[in-house]
Amino acid sequence: MAELDRKCILEMAMGAIQERADYEMAKIIDNILDVNTKAAKKRTLTITVDLIPDEERRQIRVNAVAKSKLEPTNPIATSLYLTGDSNGEMVAVEMVPQVPGQRAIDGSEQEQPKVLRLLKQA
């Protein structure tokens, strides 16, 4: 009898299990390279292989799932300032680093701050 060419379980299903693992690895690498995530945080690749034999123990159904646990993007922070508008109503205004209209050293001009839209009823 000729020697059998034995393969890893990841090569089964015509290589689809390995392909799924490679797909999730690409997502992990993209997440590591994303400057909006913490660089040194752990990412995880999990490959779950379920083996379900039939009653005669002749056939085994194999279900494989590859999934990744990525680092979420860094939180974005801003500050709001509560003040009154020209009608005397309270508004929340995003704080800006300079006085609106003031020019910076590089020649750029500070834009007007954004005013938060507050809905009283839905």
Image: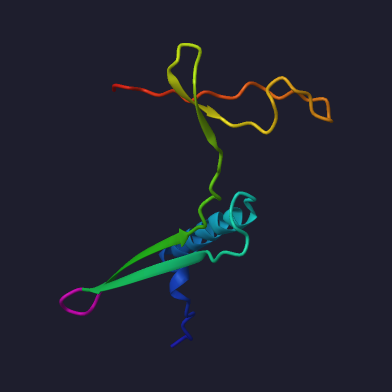
- Whether residue 105 sits left or right of residue 61 in the image: it is right
Residue 26 or 41: which is nearer the viewer?
Answer: 41
Whether residue 32 is in magenta: the answer is no
> Which quadrant of the structure image shows residue 28?
bottom right
Most common secondary structure along the magenta stretch: loop
Quarter in which the C terminus is drawn? top left
Tell me which corner region of the image, top left, top right, bottom left or bottom right, holds residue 40. bottom right
Magenta stretch bounds: 54-59
Above or below: residue 98 compared with residue 6: above
**On the rendered image, what quadrant is the N terminus found in?**
bottom left
Q: Position of residue 43 (x, y in %)?
A: 52, 64
Residue nearer the viewer, 68 or 41 = 41
Q: How many marks can you see? A: 0
Residue sitting at x 47%, y 85%: 2
- Measuring 49% from the left and 63% from the top, which residue is drawn there? 21
Please tell me whether residue 36 is drawn above or below residue 86 in the rendered image. below
Which residue is found at the position 47% from the left and 80% from the top?
6
On screen, residue 35 versus residue 42, left or right, reads right
According to the image, what is the colour scheme of the structure?
rainbow
- In the image, residue 51 above or below residue 119: below
* Residue 12: x %, y % from top left: 43, 68
Q: Is residue 34 left or right of residue 51?
A: right
Q: Residue 107 at x, y = what percent?
A: 83, 25
Q: Is residue 77 above or below residue 13?
A: above
Please state the horizontal and vertical placement of residue 47, each as a whole percent of the image: 42, 68
Q: Which residue is farthest bottom? A: 1
Tell which of 53 and 103 is nearer to you: 103
Residue occupying image coordinates x 54% and y 60%: 25
Residue sitting at the far left: 55
